[in-house]
Amino acid sequence: MSHLNNKISNTIRITNSITFLKNGFTLIELMVVVVILAIITAIALPSYTAYTRKAAVSQAEQEVQKIAEQLERHKSRNFSYKGFDPGYIYGQSSPMVSVSVKNYTLTIRDLDSQKLLTSTDRDMRGQGWAIKAETTDSQNYNLLMTSTGIRCKSKTTISSYQSCSGDETW
């Protein structure tokens, strides 16, 4: 009889265990999982946003260099930067005032008069250029590159097309 009671008691325990497994997770188990996910997110998110900012500034630098190369090609054919329009690079038929690239707006100006190179102003010589890349992300870099060799980046607004004071080069 005792042997039968042991079997019945073991069967009841197994049945209770199976019933427990069918019920799901306890609140504490779910809270532990949520805390672990929160910790992983808190560690991963800042590094991911830093990576995306680096990627955006690298893409903007690449576009600035591509436009600079096309500006030099334009000058070698026309003896001046005047009349340069980056529209053909980007497949635009109308003159482009600025170029938009992932969180950046690039503007190309005459270095001396700071007018657009597409300007028809006869007073503009077109012997120098400046490209400014301004970001929409306040925690990322603004860029400046000129035909005189200036290359700088700053997390503050670059107000001049002539220089950036005390900022990083790229």
Image: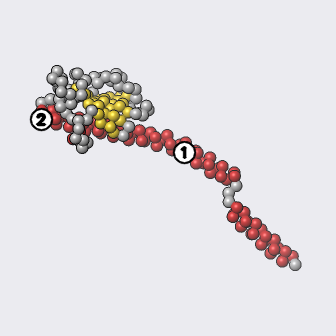
Name the one closer to the observer, 3 or 123. 123
Name the one closer to the observer, 6 or 86. 86
Quadrant placement of the C terminus: top left
What is the crowding at mark 1: few (fewer than 14 residues within 10 Å), some, or many (at least 20)? Answer: few
Q: Is residue 83 left or right of residue 8?
A: left
Q: Earlier in the sequence, mark 1 or mark 2?
A: 1
* Numbered disc 2: secondary structure: helix
Q: Amino acid at mark 1?
A: Thr
Residue 65: x and y in percent read: 26, 37
Query: From the viewer's perspective, is residue 84 above or below residue 29?
Result: above
Q: Is residue 83 left or right of residue 154?
A: left
Q: Is residue 150 left or right of residue 157?
A: left
Q: Amino acid at mark 2?
A: Arg
Taking the spot 77% from the left edge, 72% from the top edge, the residue there is: 11
Taking the spot 80% from the left edge, 75% from the top edge, the residue there is: 7
Distance from the alpha carbon under mark 1 to that under mark 2: 54 Å
Return the residue at label 2: 77
What is the quadrant of residue 119 in the picture? top left
What is the quadrant of residue 115 in the picture? top left
Residue 53: x and y in percent read: 41, 38
Q: How many marks?
A: 2
Return the residue at label 1: 41
* Residue 170 shows in the view: no
